[in-house]
């Protein structure tokens, strides 16, 4: 169906193929390829053993229009990517004089700083300045050059493993003549988003099926993230009308759950709603232990809206710092609708915030009972014109329960500020 | 060098190969394989297109002793893993009557719950109960069966994509006769850890090189995480003495930076140190916005030590809720050593915690100046017998700065409680 150029991604690193470190470069490069109209066909993660890496490179060269290789560019004998790329492309290696000068300069400064003789580095410099015949440098990351070369119909881009360096040199690769030639044949899809809260994944899946499902140039991915359901649509050129129709039919039965048509996270939307009305925001957290505040303060510039939070883990802190009446704690317990409401009221007053949100619950694994099981969470949002509350028994482990409670708290604030028709959280 | 059986991991999912969702199954399975003495040779991530998936399966079958396939087991036509596994193994498909009954039962209950006729599900049930000749079920995840089969010398395990389901059925796969036969040939390595704080990655790398480097049955990975340096050692059977020697030589020049020889995160160590002395702990956070509290409360059972935190984002909250004297804020500013000390003292008093830690800084991207640049962070820990303080200009973006400040705050508490010889944080 798609006629876009094919992209292969080869990631090398023993710690990656052994699961000791999670690969960030594959997903980054895949997103970038698709955005530029190249179809990511495969991500191969291999160690630094010659056999495995050679095999993965051989598959990419020839089969792919664009093959991006990450990692294994260091100065030691374990870093064999350049040598094996040359072999897979059937070309020799040559010492690039210009690179030799550049890398030598960097290494000299490095040797000076460490107080070690430059001679210790010379072999490494020579190794890193030795590149495949026909390859061009994309610039240095530390002492490692990014490279671009061609093997038959495949354009090969070789980038360093550290994600920040890879991302920087990828920008240069996009400007290089061989890559531009591939991208000129690229057919960038349109990427659309729908974000729902409060609907289950199967409800959204069913609505998608009832709307005719994807296909005909529109690919839909449904992804549950904490308590949100994210629908991502990849729309092929020419399929825009079908995408409009599908989105219309998908949204109609789910409208009350739809909260966004873009990628902005809920914390950004909440801060925006407060900012638009000139309201400040504060939080009172028990089981989420600071996660609501952390999400809100992750947004640059949040300080014009968010004033702070009280993480009241101990009951004494709830009583003293949030003015939760001791009789609420003794009669209803710290995990109760009454405690959540008192915490929100207390946070509003003590933090002098116009809007506040409170969370209290049992994140587990211990501390649950028949009456109050692990996962039980009470939430309360308090604003100048009213309040909203909700309670849930969230499934999952401690981490899931805390993340879901955090996301739900942020959506409770959104709903309070939007004063939606629907009263169920 | 290693003679262990080879493992291949094939992960399928359009959203994964396109980078829309990050793959969790590859790293999980890789860690599991290595732990059981199977060498993870490759992780291939492909979409659900026939050509790509078939190709990846064909590579795994034959080349690997154990090939684990994840995803594509759903009831729809896009889920083609089982069909393509059969084709790659050169066997036909058969309807498994027992599975048909089991999946039918699950689907009937599901249909009832949704109020839809079972007939809508029948085709899906039939599809999911149809498995390769010679394959055995590992049990159901929802309506999808995990499978084990053999193709020549390769044992193939097919597992569902959702990580929790995959992990559950993997446990069953480990008990199956064909997998046990592979694992009996496995040579589990010993996994060792060294964790440093305060040393740079290049200092640790140099110490490793000076100690003779890895090799001879010991593989070392150096990984910088926030401000910690993690060294992971994979020790082949028989290389224990070399590992002891290497670790001894590596630790000797870095001893003052070594904080752990296991995988426990710093928050757990800090809680343990407090618990051992019967001390409670609280926090006052500005730029980290709740991240210190979040890390501490991520540990189950933290409530016996951690009482809470004040996230004082606004200066008013610092003054009112942490008793930071207004003249400290006006004279030195909210980002100052004086403010950090006052916040820690205030948190200790207000939260009635015996130990407290405070963080204040400029996380950026805005708000920096020549005198106080983005990344400048002041930290202060206060305990019953003394205090420690530190300041840094952390490199990186907002998220990195916040994470590094959080980790540094936790290590400051550790050092306060350990009263180390070295006074530099």
Image (tube, coloured by chain):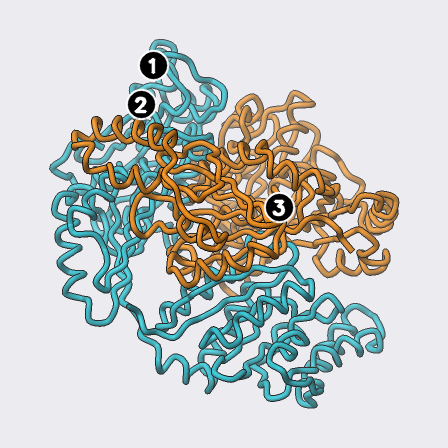
Chain colours: A orange, B cyan
Give the left or right position of residue B92, taking residue B280 as reference.
Answer: right
Give the residue at x 69% y 84%: B93
Same chain for mark 1 and mark 2? The answer is yes
Proximity of marks 2 and 3: CB atoms separated by less than 8 Å: no
Residue A259 location, x and y as percent?
Answer: 73, 41
Q: Nearer the viewer, residue A164 or B363?
A: A164
Q: Nearer the viewer, residue A8 or B108?
A: A8
Same chain for mark 2 and mark 3? The answer is no
Secondary-structure class at tag 1: helix
Give the left or right position of residue B222, taking residue A54 as reference.
Answer: left
Q: Chain of mark 1?
A: B
The residue tagged 2 is: B342
Based on the displayed image, in which of its 4 quarters is residue B353 positioned? top left
Give the left or right position of residue B341, taking residue B168 as reference.
Answer: left
Give the residue at x 38% y 29%: A98
Q: Chain of mark 2?
A: B
Residue B40 location, x and y as percent?
Answer: 42, 66
The residue tagged 1 is: B328
The residue tagged 3 is: A408
Proximity of marks 1 and 2: CB atoms separated by less than 8 Å: yes
Based on the displayed image, in which of its 4 quarters is residue B341 positioned? top left
Quarter containing the C terminus of chain B: top left
């Amino acid at each position: 169906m798609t006629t876009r150029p094919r992209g292969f991604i080869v990631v090398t690193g023993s710690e990656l193929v052994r699961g000791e470190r999670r690969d960030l470069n594959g997903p980054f490069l895949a997103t970038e390829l698709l955005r530029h109209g190249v179809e990511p066909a495969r991500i191969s993660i291999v160690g630094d053993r010659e056999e495995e890496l050679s095999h993965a490179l051989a598959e990419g060269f020839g089969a792919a229009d664009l093959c991006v290789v990450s990692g294994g560019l260091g100065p030691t004998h374990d870093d064999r990517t350049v040598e094996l790329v040359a072999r897979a492309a059937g070309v020799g290696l040559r010492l690039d004089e210009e690179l030799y000068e550049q890398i030598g300069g960097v290494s000299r400064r490095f040797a000076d700083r460490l107080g070690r003789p430059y001679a210790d580095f010379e072999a490494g410099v020579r190794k890193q300045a030795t590149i495949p015949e026909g390859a061009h440098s994309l610039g240095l990351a530390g002492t490692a050059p990014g490279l671009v070369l061609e093997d038959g119909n495949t354009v090969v881009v070789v980038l360093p493993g550290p994600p920040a360096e890879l991302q920087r040199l990828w920008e240069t690769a996009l400007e290089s003549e061989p890559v531009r030639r591939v991208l000129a044949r690229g057919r960038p899809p349109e990427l659309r988003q729908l974000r729902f809260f409060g609907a289950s994944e199967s409800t959204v899946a069913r609505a998608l099926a009832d709307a005719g499902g994807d296909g005909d140039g529109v690919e839909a991915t449904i992804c549950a993230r904490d308590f949100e359901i994210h629908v991502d649509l990849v729309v092929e050129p020419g399929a825009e009308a079908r995408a409009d129709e599908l989105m219309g039919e998908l949204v109609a039965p789910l409208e009350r759950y739809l909260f966004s048509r873009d990628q902005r996270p809920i914390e950004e939307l909440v801060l925006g709603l407060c900012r638009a009305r000139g309201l400040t925001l504060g939080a009172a957290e028990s089981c989420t232990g600071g996660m609501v505040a952390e999400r809100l303060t992750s947004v640059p510039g949040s300080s014009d809206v968010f004033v702070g939070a009280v993480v009241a883990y101990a009951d004494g802190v709830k009583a003293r710092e949030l003015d939760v009446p001791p009789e609420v704690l003794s009669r209803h317990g710290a995990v109760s609708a009454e405690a959540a409401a008192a915490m929100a009221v207390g946070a509003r007053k003590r933090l002098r915030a116009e809007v506040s949100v409170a969370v209290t619950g049992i994140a587990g694994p211990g501390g649950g009972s028949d009456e109050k099981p692990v996962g039980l969470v009470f939430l309360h949002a308090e604003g100048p014109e009213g309040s909203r509350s909700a309670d849930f028994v969230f499934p999952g482990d401690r981490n899931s329960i805390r993340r879901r409670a955090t996301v739900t708290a942020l959506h409770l604030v959104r709903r309070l500020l939007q004063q939606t028709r629907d009263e169920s959280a």
